Image (tube, rainbow, N blue to C red):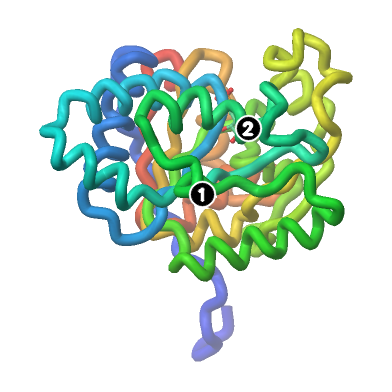
Amino acid sequence: MRHGAPSTTPTTTVVKPVVLADAAAVAERVAALLLADRLRPERPLGLATGRTMEPVYASLARRLGRLEPALAARVRDTWCSFNLDEYVGLAPQDPTSFAATMARQLVAPLGLDPGRVWLPDGRADDPEAEARRYGAAVAGAGGIGLQVLGLGLNGHVGFNEPPSDAGVACRCVTLSDHTRRQNAGAFGGDPDAVPRQAITLGMAEILSARRVLLVVTGAEKAAVLRRALAEPPTAELPASWLQHHPGVTVIADTGAMG
Ligand code: GLP
């Protein structure tokens, strides 16, 4: 860089993961952080779907059930969350949609008002317009406070597939074959049954969150997690952009640490 030229390179944070024994311990820790956020809600919560998150929501429901009733009622009454993504073409009633997944795993067990749990509309006639509307809705609600993320095996977060630059906003994306294979379990094991497109919050919205919590469990994620934390940030590994976020916490189990 020339002397005196303004720096355009964002600061890279060295992220040291919080390492816990197993997926159950990770779920407990993440659920505790989510509940703490909801007890002092400042901005909307950003939520993810996926196998990693299932035990987190189960723990959150147990924790809410143990709260003093008035406090639990306040959490419910002030709840506001935006999910990262939704498949294009799936209605909320479709059991494989992320809306249905959140209804089963979060809304029902916590006793939330479904109108306080937002997701993109997978059935919108114009998915690109829906993505713009959803991104604007997140911004209009003040942006995300605490954003929880799972990690795709190819380094995606949300459905920001490689390559995704740090500045990409909420949009309609084409899913990679890799991701469709990863998510085939929810579609009877058939990758061809997984929708080809999704609407996802972009890296821009994710990196604008006040705090980011990347949750990673299982040995199959060890290689991609290591790369995401250690390699110079690149569009080829979207999770690596998190190194530019000053408020990122990685919570992983020993399996994911390799
Ligand atoms: C999915 C979702 C992500 C999720 C990730 C990990 O495709 N779009 O939001 O976090 O991949 O999924 P899993 O937790 O099932 O490994």
Amino acid at pointer 1: Phe
* Left or right of 115 on screen, residue 185: right
Residue identified by numbered label 2? 98
Q: Residue furthest bottom?
A: 4
Q: Residue 19 location in percent, x, y?
A: 31, 25
* Left or right of 176 on screen, residue 80: left
Amino acid at pointer 2: Phe
Q: Residue 210 location in percent, x, y?
A: 38, 59
Q: Residue 225 location in percent, x, y?
A: 52, 30
Residue 21 vs 237, above or below: the answer is above
Residue drawn at point x = 32 percent, y = 25 percent: 61
Residue identified by numbered label 1? 82
Residue 226 vs 160, above or below: the answer is above
| Badge 2 element | helix
Residue drawn at point x = 85 percent, y = 52 percent: 125
Give the camera-side residue of 80 and 168.
80
Give the camera-side residue of 97 and 144.
97
First in sequence: mark 2 vs mark 1: 1
* Mark 2 beta carbon near ligand 1 (under 8 Å): yes
The quadrant of the picture showing ligand 1 is: top right
Label 2–label 1 contact, CB within 8 A:
no
